[in-house]
Amino acid sequence: MVKLFLFRLGSLLLLFILLIRETFFRQNEEDFTEDDFKRRDVDRLSGYNWKSIRNEQVQEQRKQHLIDYCHKRDAKELLPPHTTNNEIPAHYFRNIIVSDSHRLLYCYIPKVACSNWKRVLMVMHGDAADPWNIKTPDVHNRSLGYFRYLNQYSPEEIVYRLRTYYKFLFVRHPFERLVSAYRNKFIDSYNLTLFKEMYGRYIIRKYRQNPDKRSLRTGEGVNFSEFAEFLYNSDPEFMDWHWKQYDMLCHPCLIYYDFIGHFENLYEEADQLLNILQVSDKVKFPKNKTSSYKRPTKFLAKEYFNSLSKEAHDKLYEKYKHDFELFGYSMQDFL
Protein backbone atom coordinates (compact mmCIF):
# COMPACT_ATOMS: atom_id res chain seq x y z
CA MET A 1 0.00 0.00 0.00
CA VAL A 2 2.85 2.40 0.83
CA LYS A 3 4.47 1.87 -2.58
CA LEU A 4 1.12 2.39 -4.34
CA PHE A 5 0.50 5.61 -2.40
CA LEU A 6 3.95 6.99 -3.21
CA PHE A 7 3.52 6.10 -6.87
CA ARG A 8 0.20 7.95 -7.07
CA LEU A 9 1.61 10.94 -5.20
CA GLY A 10 4.60 11.09 -7.58
CA SER A 11 2.30 10.92 -10.59
CA LEU A 12 0.17 13.80 -9.30
CA LEU A 13 3.24 15.94 -8.62
CA LEU A 14 4.59 15.26 -12.12
CA LEU A 15 1.22 16.20 -13.67
CA PHE A 16 1.15 19.42 -11.60
CA ILE A 17 4.64 20.39 -12.78
CA LEU A 18 3.73 19.76 -16.41
CA LEU A 19 0.60 21.92 -16.10
CA ILE A 20 2.61 24.80 -14.61
CA ARG A 21 5.24 24.49 -17.35
CA GLU A 22 2.61 24.49 -20.11
CA THR A 23 0.88 27.56 -18.63
CA PHE A 24 4.17 29.45 -18.32
CA PHE A 25 5.21 28.58 -21.86
CA ARG A 26 1.93 29.79 -23.34
CA GLN A 27 2.07 33.05 -21.38
CA ASN A 28 5.56 33.82 -22.64
CA GLU A 29 5.19 32.46 -26.16
CA GLU A 30 4.09 35.82 -27.55
CA ASP A 31 7.27 37.48 -26.28
CA PHE A 32 9.51 35.42 -28.60
CA THR A 33 10.03 36.13 -32.28
CA GLU A 34 10.89 33.46 -34.85
CA ASP A 35 14.52 34.63 -34.82
CA ASP A 36 14.60 34.26 -31.05
CA PHE A 37 13.50 30.64 -31.34
CA LYS A 38 16.15 29.93 -33.99
CA ARG A 39 18.85 31.62 -31.93
CA ARG A 40 17.81 29.73 -28.81
CA ASP A 41 17.93 26.39 -30.66
CA VAL A 42 21.36 27.13 -32.11
CA ASP A 43 22.72 28.04 -28.68
CA ARG A 44 21.27 24.87 -27.17
CA LEU A 45 22.47 22.53 -29.91
CA SER A 46 25.94 24.03 -30.20
CA GLY A 47 26.79 22.55 -26.81
CA TYR A 48 26.33 19.00 -28.10
CA ASN A 49 29.15 16.91 -29.54
CA TRP A 50 27.17 15.41 -32.38
CA LYS A 51 30.10 13.33 -33.60
CA SER A 52 30.42 11.72 -30.19
CA ILE A 53 26.69 11.03 -30.08
CA ARG A 54 26.80 9.44 -33.53
CA ASN A 55 29.76 7.27 -32.51
CA GLU A 56 27.91 6.11 -29.41
CA GLN A 57 24.88 5.24 -31.51
CA VAL A 58 27.05 3.21 -33.90
CA GLN A 59 28.50 1.29 -30.97
CA GLU A 60 25.08 0.56 -29.51
CA GLN A 61 23.82 -0.65 -32.89
CA ARG A 62 26.79 -2.97 -33.33
CA LYS A 63 26.44 -4.42 -29.85
CA GLN A 64 22.69 -4.88 -30.17
CA HIS A 65 23.12 -6.56 -33.56
CA LEU A 66 25.64 -8.96 -32.04
CA ILE A 67 23.39 -9.74 -29.07
CA ASP A 68 20.40 -10.39 -31.33
CA TYR A 69 22.38 -12.81 -33.47
CA CYS A 70 23.85 -14.60 -30.45
CA HIS A 71 20.34 -15.18 -29.09
CA LYS A 72 19.45 -17.04 -32.30
CA ARG A 73 22.30 -19.52 -31.92
CA ASP A 74 22.24 -22.85 -30.19
CA ALA A 75 23.86 -22.34 -26.79
CA LYS A 76 25.62 -25.70 -27.06
CA GLU A 77 27.72 -24.56 -30.02
CA LEU A 78 29.08 -21.63 -28.02
CA LEU A 79 30.72 -23.90 -25.47
CA PRO A 80 33.83 -26.05 -25.94
CA PRO A 81 33.26 -29.54 -27.39
CA HIS A 82 32.63 -32.21 -24.79
CA THR A 83 32.29 -29.61 -22.04
CA THR A 84 30.61 -30.54 -18.76
CA ASN A 85 28.79 -28.34 -16.27
CA ASN A 86 29.05 -25.42 -18.74
CA GLU A 87 32.63 -24.83 -17.61
CA ILE A 88 34.82 -22.83 -20.00
CA PRO A 89 38.52 -23.76 -20.00
CA ALA A 90 41.08 -21.01 -19.41
CA HIS A 91 42.65 -21.46 -22.86
CA TYR A 92 39.50 -19.93 -24.36
CA PHE A 93 40.83 -16.58 -23.13
CA ARG A 94 44.41 -16.80 -24.37
CA ASN A 95 43.85 -14.08 -26.99
CA ILE A 96 42.71 -11.53 -24.42
CA ILE A 97 45.40 -9.16 -23.18
CA VAL A 98 44.93 -7.81 -19.66
CA SER A 99 45.88 -4.34 -18.48
CA ASP A 100 45.27 -4.34 -14.74
CA SER A 101 46.58 -0.80 -14.36
CA HIS A 102 43.93 0.47 -16.81
CA ARG A 103 41.28 -2.15 -15.96
CA LEU A 104 41.19 -3.09 -19.62
CA LEU A 105 40.81 -6.26 -21.71
CA TYR A 106 41.75 -6.35 -25.39
CA CYS A 107 40.97 -9.40 -27.52
CA TYR A 108 43.47 -9.24 -30.35
CA ILE A 109 42.71 -10.69 -33.78
CA PRO A 110 45.66 -11.26 -36.15
CA LYS A 111 45.46 -9.25 -39.39
CA VAL A 112 43.20 -6.64 -37.77
CA ALA A 113 45.78 -4.05 -36.65
CA CYS A 114 46.69 -6.10 -33.60
CA SER A 115 50.41 -5.23 -33.84
CA ASN A 116 49.68 -1.53 -33.53
CA TRP A 117 47.17 -2.05 -30.71
CA LYS A 118 49.82 -3.99 -28.82
CA ARG A 119 52.22 -1.10 -29.41
CA VAL A 120 49.64 1.28 -27.97
CA LEU A 121 49.21 -0.90 -24.89
CA MET A 122 52.98 -1.06 -24.38
CA VAL A 123 53.14 2.74 -24.37
CA MET A 124 50.21 2.88 -21.96
CA HIS A 125 52.08 0.46 -19.66
CA GLY A 126 55.26 2.54 -19.79
CA ASP A 127 57.26 -0.09 -21.72
CA ALA A 128 58.00 2.37 -24.53
CA ALA A 129 57.64 6.08 -25.26
CA ASP A 130 56.86 5.86 -28.97
CA PRO A 131 54.83 3.07 -30.61
CA TRP A 132 57.08 3.07 -33.68
CA ASN A 133 60.17 2.39 -31.58
CA ILE A 134 58.79 -1.09 -30.87
CA LYS A 135 59.82 -3.84 -33.28
CA THR A 136 57.09 -6.11 -34.61
CA PRO A 137 58.76 -9.37 -33.44
CA ASP A 138 58.93 -7.97 -29.91
CA VAL A 139 55.24 -7.12 -30.00
CA HIS A 140 54.27 -10.75 -30.61
CA ASN A 141 56.93 -12.50 -28.53
CA ARG A 142 55.13 -13.74 -25.43
CA SER A 143 58.36 -14.83 -23.80
CA LEU A 144 59.43 -11.19 -23.42
CA GLY A 145 56.66 -10.75 -20.88
CA TYR A 146 55.26 -7.43 -22.04
CA PHE A 147 51.68 -8.64 -21.65
CA ARG A 148 49.63 -10.83 -19.38
CA TYR A 149 46.83 -12.84 -20.91
CA LEU A 150 43.51 -13.66 -19.33
CA ASN A 151 44.13 -17.42 -19.40
CA GLN A 152 47.07 -16.88 -17.02
CA TYR A 153 44.74 -15.90 -14.17
CA SER A 154 42.80 -18.10 -11.77
CA PRO A 155 39.14 -18.86 -12.58
CA GLU A 156 37.99 -16.37 -9.95
CA GLU A 157 40.30 -13.67 -11.30
CA ILE A 158 39.11 -14.34 -14.86
CA VAL A 159 35.46 -13.94 -13.86
CA TYR A 160 36.21 -10.75 -11.92
CA ARG A 161 37.99 -9.14 -14.88
CA LEU A 162 35.33 -10.17 -17.37
CA ARG A 163 32.68 -8.61 -15.16
CA THR A 164 34.41 -5.36 -14.24
CA TYR A 165 37.04 -4.42 -16.85
CA TYR A 166 36.42 -2.45 -20.04
CA LYS A 167 36.59 -4.85 -23.01
CA PHE A 168 37.24 -4.10 -26.67
CA LEU A 169 38.14 -5.73 -29.98
CA PHE A 170 38.51 -4.73 -33.62
CA VAL A 171 37.15 -6.77 -36.54
CA ARG A 172 37.47 -6.65 -40.31
CA HIS A 173 35.56 -7.97 -43.32
CA PRO A 174 36.29 -11.72 -43.01
CA PHE A 175 37.18 -12.18 -46.68
CA GLU A 176 39.51 -9.18 -46.71
CA ARG A 177 41.24 -10.55 -43.63
CA LEU A 178 41.81 -13.88 -45.39
CA VAL A 179 43.43 -12.11 -48.33
CA SER A 180 45.63 -10.13 -45.94
CA ALA A 181 46.70 -13.35 -44.21
CA TYR A 182 47.42 -15.06 -47.54
CA ARG A 183 49.56 -12.19 -48.81
CA ASN A 184 51.40 -11.80 -45.54
CA LYS A 185 52.11 -15.48 -44.94
CA PHE A 186 52.59 -16.84 -48.46
CA ILE A 187 53.85 -13.86 -50.47
CA ASP A 188 55.82 -11.62 -48.09
CA SER A 189 59.48 -12.66 -48.25
CA TYR A 190 60.15 -12.61 -44.51
CA ASN A 191 57.43 -15.20 -43.88
CA LEU A 192 58.05 -17.50 -46.82
CA THR A 193 60.29 -20.09 -45.20
CA LEU A 194 58.26 -20.58 -42.03
CA PHE A 195 54.82 -20.81 -43.59
CA LYS A 196 56.00 -22.79 -46.59
CA GLU A 197 57.30 -25.41 -44.20
CA MET A 198 54.30 -25.31 -41.88
CA TYR A 199 51.48 -25.14 -44.40
CA GLY A 200 52.72 -24.70 -47.98
CA ARG A 201 53.99 -28.23 -48.52
CA TYR A 202 50.83 -29.72 -47.01
CA ILE A 203 48.53 -27.51 -49.12
CA ILE A 204 50.34 -28.35 -52.35
CA ARG A 205 50.44 -32.07 -51.60
CA LYS A 206 46.76 -32.13 -50.62
CA TYR A 207 45.12 -29.74 -53.08
CA ARG A 208 47.34 -29.43 -56.17
CA GLN A 209 46.95 -31.83 -59.05
CA ASN A 210 50.22 -33.29 -60.31
CA PRO A 211 52.57 -31.14 -58.21
CA ASP A 212 56.22 -31.16 -59.20
CA LYS A 213 58.92 -32.44 -56.87
CA ARG A 214 60.35 -29.01 -56.17
CA SER A 215 57.05 -27.52 -54.96
CA LEU A 216 56.43 -30.57 -52.80
CA ARG A 217 59.86 -30.13 -51.26
CA THR A 218 59.75 -26.36 -50.76
CA GLY A 219 56.02 -25.60 -50.40
CA GLU A 220 56.58 -22.67 -52.73
CA GLY A 221 53.94 -21.01 -54.89
CA VAL A 222 50.69 -21.75 -53.05
CA ASN A 223 47.95 -19.98 -55.02
CA PHE A 224 44.87 -18.41 -53.51
CA SER A 225 42.43 -21.06 -54.71
CA GLU A 226 44.55 -23.74 -53.04
CA PHE A 227 44.68 -21.68 -49.87
CA ALA A 228 40.88 -21.25 -49.97
CA GLU A 229 40.33 -24.99 -50.38
CA PHE A 230 42.66 -25.62 -47.47
CA LEU A 231 40.65 -23.19 -45.32
CA TYR A 232 37.17 -24.52 -45.93
CA ASN A 233 38.35 -28.06 -45.31
CA SER A 234 40.14 -27.19 -42.06
CA ASP A 235 38.92 -28.00 -38.57
CA PRO A 236 38.27 -24.64 -36.84
CA GLU A 237 39.71 -25.97 -33.59
CA PHE A 238 43.12 -26.42 -35.21
CA MET A 239 43.27 -23.41 -37.51
CA ASP A 240 46.21 -21.03 -37.40
CA TRP A 241 45.41 -17.81 -35.54
CA HIS A 242 45.90 -15.72 -38.65
CA TRP A 243 42.80 -17.19 -40.27
CA LYS A 244 40.94 -18.61 -37.29
CA GLN A 245 37.39 -17.29 -36.92
CA TYR A 246 36.66 -14.27 -34.69
CA ASP A 247 34.02 -16.41 -33.08
CA MET A 248 36.72 -18.86 -31.97
CA LEU A 249 39.30 -16.25 -30.94
CA CYS A 250 37.24 -13.77 -28.94
CA HIS A 251 33.97 -15.61 -28.20
CA PRO A 252 31.73 -12.55 -28.58
CA CYS A 253 28.60 -14.51 -27.66
CA LEU A 254 30.12 -15.40 -24.30
CA ILE A 255 31.85 -12.07 -23.57
CA TYR A 256 30.17 -8.68 -23.66
CA TYR A 257 32.50 -6.22 -25.40
CA ASP A 258 32.07 -2.56 -24.50
CA PHE A 259 33.62 -1.37 -27.76
CA ILE A 260 33.51 -3.08 -31.16
CA GLY A 261 35.81 -1.37 -33.63
CA HIS A 262 35.83 -1.86 -37.39
CA PHE A 263 39.09 -1.95 -39.32
CA GLU A 264 37.37 -0.18 -42.22
CA ASN A 265 37.28 2.98 -40.10
CA LEU A 266 40.36 2.17 -38.04
CA TYR A 267 41.98 5.51 -37.30
CA GLU A 268 38.82 7.41 -36.44
CA GLU A 269 37.53 4.66 -34.19
CA ALA A 270 40.95 4.14 -32.59
CA ASP A 271 40.99 7.83 -31.65
CA GLN A 272 37.46 7.48 -30.32
CA LEU A 273 38.45 4.54 -28.12
CA LEU A 274 41.58 6.25 -26.77
CA ASN A 275 39.40 9.20 -25.79
CA ILE A 276 37.00 6.88 -23.99
CA LEU A 277 39.93 5.30 -22.15
CA GLN A 278 41.21 8.82 -21.31
CA VAL A 279 44.71 8.12 -22.62
CA SER A 280 44.64 10.16 -25.84
CA ASP A 281 47.02 12.68 -24.26
CA LYS A 282 49.57 9.90 -23.61
CA VAL A 283 49.50 7.85 -26.80
CA LYS A 284 48.29 8.11 -30.39
CA PHE A 285 47.35 5.17 -32.55
CA PRO A 286 50.22 4.76 -35.05
CA LYS A 287 49.44 5.15 -38.71
CA ASN A 288 51.34 2.96 -41.13
CA LYS A 289 54.09 5.06 -42.65
CA THR A 290 54.90 2.80 -45.58
CA SER A 291 53.61 -0.36 -47.19
CA SER A 292 55.43 -2.95 -49.26
CA TYR A 293 52.26 -3.40 -51.31
CA LYS A 294 51.68 -1.28 -54.38
CA ARG A 295 47.93 -1.87 -54.02
CA PRO A 296 46.15 -2.09 -50.66
CA THR A 297 44.49 -5.34 -49.66
CA LYS A 298 40.97 -3.92 -49.85
CA PHE A 299 41.41 -3.29 -53.60
CA LEU A 300 43.05 -6.62 -54.36
CA ALA A 301 40.68 -8.72 -52.25
CA LYS A 302 37.91 -8.70 -54.84
CA GLU A 303 40.33 -9.78 -57.55
CA TYR A 304 41.48 -12.72 -55.45
CA PHE A 305 37.90 -13.77 -54.78
CA ASN A 306 36.90 -13.32 -58.39
CA SER A 307 39.39 -16.08 -59.18
CA LEU A 308 37.39 -18.52 -57.05
CA SER A 309 34.38 -20.56 -58.10
CA LYS A 310 30.94 -19.89 -56.66
CA GLU A 311 31.23 -23.17 -54.78
CA ALA A 312 34.44 -21.97 -53.13
CA HIS A 313 32.75 -18.66 -52.26
CA ASP A 314 29.86 -20.45 -50.63
CA LYS A 315 32.06 -22.86 -48.70
CA LEU A 316 34.26 -20.08 -47.36
CA TYR A 317 31.21 -18.09 -46.34
CA GLU A 318 29.81 -21.10 -44.52
CA LYS A 319 33.13 -21.57 -42.71
CA TYR A 320 33.15 -17.91 -41.59
CA LYS A 321 29.39 -17.42 -41.42
CA HIS A 322 29.28 -16.41 -37.77
CA ASP A 323 32.00 -13.79 -38.29
CA PHE A 324 29.90 -12.25 -41.06
CA GLU A 325 26.65 -12.33 -39.13
CA LEU A 326 28.00 -11.29 -35.73
CA PHE A 327 29.54 -8.09 -37.03
CA GLY A 328 27.22 -7.11 -39.85
CA TYR A 329 29.37 -7.94 -42.87
CA SER A 330 28.05 -9.15 -46.22
CA MET A 331 29.44 -11.60 -48.77
CA GLN A 332 27.83 -9.50 -51.50
CA ASP A 333 30.77 -7.11 -51.30
CA PHE A 334 32.96 -9.80 -52.89
CA LEU A 335 30.67 -11.16 -55.59
Image (spheres, rainbow, N blue to C red):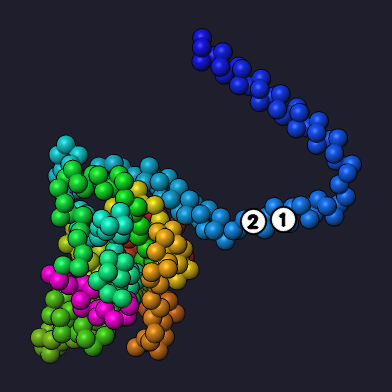
Left or right of 93 in this view: 330: right
The tag on residue 139 is none
Position of residue 273 measured from the top left corner of the image (x, y, whole percent): 42, 62
* Residue at x-position 16% and y-position 36%: 85
- Tell me which residue sits at (10%, 86%) in the image: 217
Q: Magenta segment, which residues? A: 130-144
Disc 2 element: loop
Which residue is nearer to you in this view: 47 or 72?
Answer: 47
Q: Which mark is residue 43?
A: 1
At a point 62% along the width and 56% down the height, the residue shown is 48
* Neighbour tally class for label 1: few under 14, some 14-19, many 20 plus, Cα within 10 Å: few
Residue 47's tag is 2
What's the CA distance linking mark 2 and mark 1?
A: 7 Å
| Dominant SS in magenta | helix
Quadrant of residue 106 in the image?
bottom left
Q: In the image, what residue type sits under mark 2?
A: Gly
Q: Are marks 2 and 1 in contact (CB under 8 Å)?
A: yes
Q: Is residue 236 above or below residue 31?
A: below
Q: Position of residue 239 (x, y in %)?
A: 20, 64
Can the viewer see residue 224 in this picture?
Answer: no
In the rendering, at what x and y percent does residue 269 appear?
Answer: 45, 65
- Which residue is at 81% across, 30% downward? 23
Residue 146 painted magenta: no
